[in-house]
Amino acid sequence: MDQLEMKKVAAKAALQFVKPDMIVGVGSGSTVNCFIEELGSLRNQIKGAVAASKASEELLRKQGIEVFSANDVSSLDIYVDGADEINPQKMMIKGGGAALTREKIVASLAKNFICIVDSSKQVDVLGTTFPLPVEVIPMARSQVARKLVSLGGSPEWREGVITDNGNVILDVHHFTIMNPVEMEKELNNVAGVVTNGIFALNAANTLIVGTPEGAKIIS
Ligand code: 5RP
């Protein structure tokens, strides 16, 4: 079974958490795109969705699902999103699709953060296989890059990419993230950083891993 098939298995399994009349929080990325396609089958049973990216918003509308703003809701029962890496504590690196800021915002509204991945995303230590994305205000790009170097990382500007919020992304290589909570806080305190891609302060509650043997659900 290839990676996309495993993503589809995880996405389909997430549907069991969607209940009638819900407004569903929806992240972004290729695994979430599979989830949005599945969610289309429930369009007449749910109230709608809050999306974490313009791309997801568009796909949800194509499925006939009403899209609400995060400002329209006070909380969400569930938020479904993928990850670039996830550790055994369900802490993640996210932002491969440059949507990390809105993902953190929508995720923080949810009672149950459901992370859907294929098994290649499971790691023991964050930062092992994927660089850490950091969203930065454009005028602060160089100074934030210098600060990231001083912290032991090797930042690389994701040239040509502008986030939905009009900012740039630095992908930081060679960070081995032994204490994700502390590192998330430290990077958030760097002037010019909008969000970093460590999701540890608000880790996932439920992990669904797509495998050739079916979906593994870890609560
Ligand atoms: C986007 C993300 C995605 O959830 C993450 O990159 C995983 O993507 P995919 O499902 O395509 O593997 O954080 O900002």
Image (tube, rainbow, N blue to C red):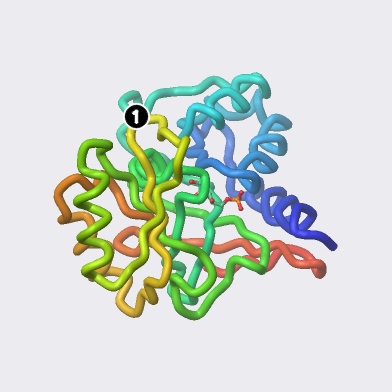
Q: Residue at x 38, y 38 (%)?
A: 102
Q: Residue reaching furthest right? A: 1
Left or right of residue 127, residue 192 in this image: left
Is ligand 1 closer than 8 angstroms to the Cβ of mark 1? no
Q: Is residue 32 visible?
A: yes
Residue 196 in the image: state x and y as whole percent.
Answer: 32, 54
Q: Residue at x 24, y 48 (%)?
A: 142
Q: Residue at x 40, y 46 (%)?
A: 100
Q: Residues within 10 Å of mark 1 (few under 14, many from 20)?
A: few
Q: Is residue 110 visible?
A: no
Residue 191 in the image: state x and y as whole percent.
Answer: 14, 49
Q: Residue at x 33, y 45 (%)?
A: 135
Is 132 in front, or is 76?
132
Relative vertical location of residue 185 with respect to residue 23 in this rendering, above or below: below
When asked about the image quadrant of residue 166, the answer is: top left
Is 168 in front, or is 102?
168
Secondary structure type for disc 1: loop
Residue 151 in the image: state x and y as whole percent.
Answer: 24, 70
Left or right of residue 168, residue 122 in this image: right
Residue 161 in the image: state x and y as whole percent.
Answer: 46, 37
Quarter of the image where the N terminus is located: bottom right
- Mark 1 belongs to which amino acid? Gly
Is 181 in front, or is 204?
181
When asked about the image quadrant of residue 6, the answer is: bottom right
Instruction: Give the tally of numbered discs.
Output: 1
Relative vertical location of residue 102 with respect to residue 157 in this rendering, above or below: above
Left or right of residue 138, residue 215 in this image: right
The residue that mark 1 highlights is 166
